[in-house]
Amino acid sequence: MITLTELKCLADAQSSYHILKPWWDVFWYYITLIMLLVAVLAGALQLTQSRVLCCLPCKVEFDNHCAVPWDILKASVNASSNPGTLLPLPLRIQNDLHRQQYSYIDAVCYEKQLHWFAKFFPYLVLLHTLIFAACSNFWLHYPSTSSRLEHFVAILHKCFDSPWTTRALSETVAEQSVRPRKLSKSKTLLSSSGCSAEIDSNKQSLPYPQPGLESAGIESSTSSVLDKKEGEQAKAIFEKVKRFRMHVEQKDIIYRVYLKQIIVKVILFVLIITYVPYFLTYITLEIDCSIDVQAFTGYKRYQCVYSLAEIFKVLASFYVILVILYGLTSSYSLWWMLRSSLKQYSFEALREKSNYSDIPDVKNDFAFILHLADQYDPLYSKRFSIFLSEVSENKLKQINLNNEWTVEKLKSKLVKNSQDKIELHLFMLSGLPDNVFELTEMEVLTLELIPEVKLPSTVSQLANLRELHVYHSSLVVDHPALAFLEENLKILRLKFTEMGKIPRWVFHLKNLKELYLSGCVLPEQLSTMQLEGFQDLKNLRTLYLKSSLSRIPQVITDLLPSLQKLSLDNEGSKLVVLNNLKKMVNLKSLELISCDLERIPHSIFSLNNLHELDLKENNLKTVEEIISFQHLQNLSCLKLWHNNIAYIPAQIGALSNLEQLSLDHNNIENLPLQLFLCTKLHYLDLSYNHLTFIPEEIQYLSNLQYFAVTNNNIEMLPDGLFQCKKLQCLLLGKNSLMNLSPLVGELSNLTHLELIGNYLETLPPELEGCQSLKRSCLIVEENLLSTLPLPVTERLQTCLDKC
């Protein structure tokens, strides 16, 4: 048994589809109800009538039918003019029939003589009505369409009731009311000054507060905050609309089913209007019934009266009128479907009137459903379109983001980086929270894996911002924000997920000093605009490029001659052409990393102001060209690490000004004595080579502070090493040392000592002389610490400071 609750749910489900029913569907519904009433009324009259036919015997027959007085009179006139004509004579048969005989005659005449249309008229009307009703609702329950329609109606109701929809539309109305006043005011000012200007009315509004809205008393788009729950609900609607559009826009099943059911209605209308008026003439009041029952009643012809004839004629005529109205409406709906482009729906009018100019056009079933909704009420499509706009979605994301990332939460993310600067690192957010611009103490802003970031004018509140890092994110800068960055930004780091061009706003940062670009390929021939852009970076001193280039871009060597540091990480690709390096005469630091260089480029020897040269991770096997470095009088740092260098030429001794030398991660087996003529060396790294001993001449490096020979095959340390009194960091790990000389105690400035991975059995007690050495900076096996005297161990344990 169906409960009231189930009936209520069924009624609610049916009523929810009213959005998809245009006016003709509603008209069909009411006509169908009236048809149903006609069928019920006709059926009730037929069922409740005790005698549908009332038959009386015919006493006189004339011309094969019952004779009436008029027939006898007519026969008499004919007989007088024609003596041979026979007059009809009354039948002299008994006529006192019993009541049951009359009932019998009525039943037999009803079955045999009454026309089938008169008998089954109520049932035909009921059958037609049920077919019409089924055709009207078939598409709502057809398996391939019902789920989509139900899903669409559910989404549409949520869109209609969402607070975000109301807010977005109210913003549009507010901006439309403000724009004419601002426009008229601008025209007044222009006319008063004698000037004229063309105003671009098609300019897209940005999802940030617009200047002038607040002054007009209109609430800005970001000034009011949605409830967190409402924001999450609106976000869910956006996702549902995207999935629904992706699924429905590819098919036209709903359109075809709806078209077929209308065609069926038109065909049914033609059939009904063809045969019903014709058979309507068979509903008559008098019926001549001739049956052979004379043996039972004494008569074989009867005259019957159909008691429902007149009312059935009225009902049938009314029914024909209803069918004509139904058919005309069906023909109009068919004409509407065939003449209109219902598989495309354009929001062009809405785009022109609102600030959501990015609302896309839709097609196929999605478009058809919206056309049907328009016939009911265009406001539904207008509200639904808000959730098709990417601008609207971005606004909502911004509001939800602001709700989640409060000022207090952002302050907790502030840290001091390795350069002792206050940094905020935002990772994998949907956008940039507006509350970021309340952190006025911030110096470094890092944005990583944020799909779309927009810097509004409020960035000017970050008075201390000097450094910006953008990693795998798309950054758009407003014009007022760009003016602020032009004056304040000093360091910019950009890292791209995909290859692309440098953003145009970068070239406006006239005070930029350091630019780091990773993943951005500079084409061999850049456009004129980009050439001019690099030329505007007059204060740029450091440029870092991480990409795969075959040559150093000409735009760098020609337009940035004042560049002081150039770092190029070619990610293993071979750098072929280097001759244009000669133009960069002001270069002080050059890094050519992973460029697959086999020899040191000769163009480097023309850089007279070069202080630092880094050739890390190349394919250098020999460095015979090192003799030419003597022309570089200012060269103080040389890094030839992570190569395949087998030996160091003796000419290295000519580099008298060398202070730092990195030769680690090579294949060096011996050290030339001339190396120790570089007496200004304070940093020497020979780790990860094949050295077996260190020459005694190392004692001449009196300024040495850092010395590393980790991961070699050294068995004994020379006493001259301990004559380097300024030594602070000594790395001897992973070698073949059997013992450590007691002379180590003379290194009073030693702060870091690494001995792990050797064959030491004891540590010299003279380590007590290394007063600056802490336990945390003594890298050695734990069991060797027990070989030290207790006072030495206690002194090392008193301080656990990090190195």
Image: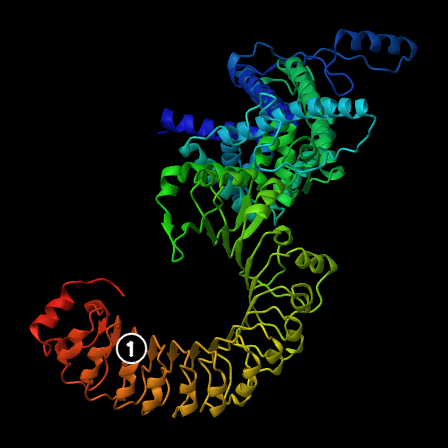
**Residue 270 against residue 411 in the figure, above or below:** above
Q: Nearer the viewer, residue 11 or 561?
A: 561
Counting from the top left corner in percent of width and height, residue 532 is at 71, 57
Q: Residue at x 76, y 16 (%)?
A: 62
- Quadrant that contains the C terminus: bottom left
Q: Nearer the viewer, residue 224 or 698?
A: 698
For residue 633, what is the image quadrant? bottom right
Count residues near mark 1 (Cα–Cα under 10 Å), then give few for <14, some for 14-19, many for 20+: some
Check disc 1 and report the residue beneath it.
Answer: 725
Q: Amino acid at mark 1?
A: Lys
Question: Camera-side residue: 693 or 292?
Answer: 693
Relative image position of residue 418 (x, y in whole percent): 38, 58
The percent position of residue 32, horizontal first and vertical second, equals 60, 25
Rendered view: 672 above or below 785: below
Say if residue 588 shows up in the picture: yes
- Residue 105, picture quadrant: top right
Residue located at (65% from left, 29% from top): 375
